[in-house]
Amino acid sequence: TKIMLGFQTESMQQEFSSTQKYGVMIGDMPYFDITTGLDGKGNVKATKANGNGKRWKTAGFFGRLNYDYMGRYLAEINMRYDGSSRFRRGSRWQWSPSFSLGWNIAQEKFWESLTDIANTLKLRVSYGELGNQNTTAWYPTYRDMILKSSNGTWLQDNQKPNTAEPGDLVSNSLTWEKVRTWDVGFDYGFFNNRLTGSFDYYIRYTDGMVGPAPELPSTLGTSAPKTNNCNLRTNGWELSIGWRDRLNSGLGYSATFTLSDAKTIVTSYPSNATNTIGLNKYVEGREIGEIWGLQTIGIAKSEEEMQAHLSSLPKGGQEAIGSKWSAGDIMYRDLNGDGKISKGASTLDDHGDLKVIGNSTPRYFFGIDLNADWKGFDVRLFFQGVMKRDYWGKDNFCGYLFGARGDKDMWHARGLVEYQDYFRAQAIGIDGHELPANLDAYYPRPVFKEGAKNQETQSRYL
């Protein structure tokens, strides 16, 4: 039996300062005493100085009770009591208990005949709680005042005055995010523990994750404060297998492979009362990272094909997402059978023809670790990666993906050969720079002032 008691404290402090003056006279000598204070047009520019400091502190008390009976029966109990300066009194401290139980079957007498083959076979179960205080800003429960130098829109003594404005609303009850984890697993070792590995299955509950509060009337004039209002449940597993040995020549080597996966469900999130769906939206009862989009049929190769597609949608065609549909445009599938292509209200109850086409959460993390050593020399190779992840960007992402397209008044074109694979009903170009017709194109036709109708979130370009 072992008992441990301890105390831990941590302090984080950041300080920042900067000064700015215009008119560097010598490029590689940016010193204040040899600058003019004038901008490139000869206008006098005021010297600016900025600075700030931030800090937080934590303190924690912890204890551990460990019991080991002949390496056969194992038990451990941990207890933590942590506080953070980021939170107000009454919300500053929290308890974090945990325990684990283990049974090493390979140490039982009935296993003795198998010890030459299986040296270790340990069953484990554990439960633990942890707290996360890195929830938002440095001072999340205190409303700050934003000071700005020479920022006023009126003049006082021919100078713009300094201004101050209050920050966003805060919640004075904000506290730790709590993570509770149940885990069951086993460890094994064969052939004098040259072959080893483990497997774990866990369920993790995140309680009180910090997120935006429910929307308040716009007459408030500011955004709602963040609160501990989101709960998650994660189901996942982890496995590892490794081999380690040393040859008679003195060469030692080892290889280890790891693989893990997990899914997270939103179990409670009142801030999205309408269950609005979309990129980076939390919807109660749905999986984190869902990508909702339209199902792509393909690119219309002719006017006749596009008109036939629109005729199959007698209740509005594809007008809800764009107009002037022609050869080279995307044809979307009517999933709800209402005779038109639309996104409905983009909510869980009314999502029109939207469906879950992917998930942005990385899946199946793997790692390969290779080691070798010989007479004081060693080498290691380590590989890691993700086997599956769906991605759909936003903002300027479409310009980079589609290469040549029209959007509002801009023509986006990227200088890669691959981007020439866009729809062309006939050959184009002059003076030996022709591009042939391309009816089986990867990209739709470029359009002008017709919005992003071909760049809707969709299955084709996920």
Image: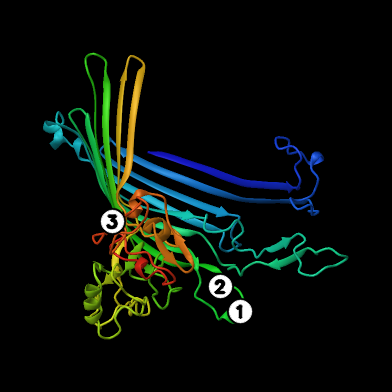
Residue 264: assigned label: none
Label 2 is placed on what type of residue? Answer: Ala
- Distance (Cα) linking label 3 and label 1: 59 Å
Task: Name the residue carrying label 2.
Answer: 224
- Tell me the residue at 60%/46% (across/down): 12
Task: Name the residue carrying label 3.
Answer: 436
Residue closest to the far front: 431
Asked whether the residues under the numbered discs 3 and 2 touch, taking CB atoms below 8 Å apart as contact, a structural biologist would say no
- Distance (Cα) linking label 3 and label 2: 56 Å
Does 208 sit left or right of 245 as displayed? Answer: right
Select label 3 or label 2 by which is in front.
Answer: 3
Asked whether the residues under the numbered discs 1 and 2 touch, taking CB atoms below 8 Å apart as contact, a structural biologist would say yes
Res 311 quadrant in image: bottom left
Please, is residue 250 above or below residue 177 in the view? Answer: above
In what quadrant of the picture does the C terminus appear?
bottom left
Does 429 sit left or right of 200 as displayed? Answer: right
Residue closest to the far right: 157
- Disc 1 crowd rating (10 Å Cα; few below 14, some 14-19, many 20+) is few
The image shows residue 358 at horizontal and vertical percentages of 30, 62
The image shows residue 148 at horizontal and vertical percentages of 73, 61
